Amino acid sequence: MGAITGTFKGFGVTFSHMFRKVVTTDYPFKPPVSAPRYHGRHILNRHPDGLEKCIGCELCAWACPADAIYVEGGDNTDEQRFSPGERYASTYQINYARCIFCGLCIEACPTRSLTMSNEYELARDNRQDLIFTKEQLLAPLLEGMEQPPHPMRLGDSEKDYYVGALDNPGTSAGAETSPMGPGRYQVEEHPGVTFPGAEQAAQRAAAGKGEGA
Ligand code: SF4
Ligand code: SF4
């Protein structure tokens, strides 16, 4: 008797779900939009003139509990400048076979270079392709940005460069656009986003200011 009751209880669960709204998504043709603070693929952000925010300090690698990050630092020179500080990351890799998307690395980053995007399509058919290189992780160049190496273009001194709030708000705008799939991951609410300060940076570059700074 108990078995019969249990059977009907079990079918009751099945029947109750038959009349609920179907939640199947039309993936991959209409990929679902993730929550704004979803932890997805990492981004290495840039300053408004295009220089890299990463200074190659390795704090993210030390903070990572999964040993997923590998960084090698290099020295900037006046002729070869990739970031506004003394050092930059000559090699930067994240191994997505190890990463658990905990976000500790972005908490550890002192320059807000490292943030996370909403991109979740990270499956690959071999382990090697799960190791993302610096070129894959760097934010795309937006309007007014210039491909490094180049001199600092946001001020004639480091103080101007960092403290000039209007020119350098320290955001990661543009990081929403994945270099892996242009346009696909662009945040719908901000189509064609331009980096604050990019216009000023372009004007300074056009006027030749900031050279050799
Ligand atoms: S999100 Fe967590 S596991 Fe992934 S690289 Fe950052 S610290 Fe490591
Ligand atoms: S991403 Fe941030 S914490 Fe990691 S090496 Fe670059 S500056 Fe340092």
Image (cartoon, grey):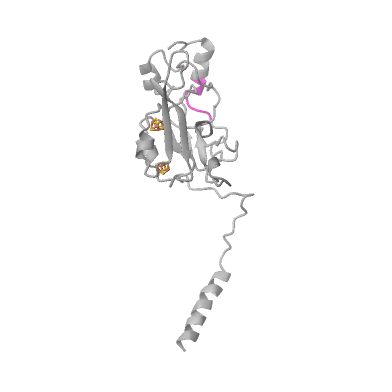
Above or below: residue 73 compared with residue 10: above
Residue 52 horizontal/vertical position (percent) = 46, 26
The residue positioned 48% from the left and 45% from the top of the image is 97
Residue 57 occupies which quadrant of the picture? top left
Above or below: residue 171 compared with residue 101: above
| Residue 151 magenta-highlighted | no
The residue positioned 37% from the left and 44% from the top of the image is 65
Is 115 on the left or on the right of 14, as rendered? left
Above or below: residue 37 compared with residue 9: above
Residue 74 occupies which quadrant of the picture? top left
Q: What segment is highlighted magenta in the picture?
A: 194-200
Residue 154 horizontal/vertical position (percent) = 44, 18
Residue 57 is at least partly visible in this image: yes
Q: Quadrant of the C terminus?
A: top left
Is 129 on the left or on the right of 115, as rendered? right
Viewer-closest of 1 and 35: 1
Viewer-closest of 52 and 69: 69
| Residue 195 magenta-highlighted | yes
Judged from the image, the quadrant occupied by ligand 1 is top left
The residue positioned 56% from the left and 67% from the top of the image is 20
Q: Farthest residue toward the right? A: 29
Residue 91 horizontal/vertical position (percent) = 46, 29
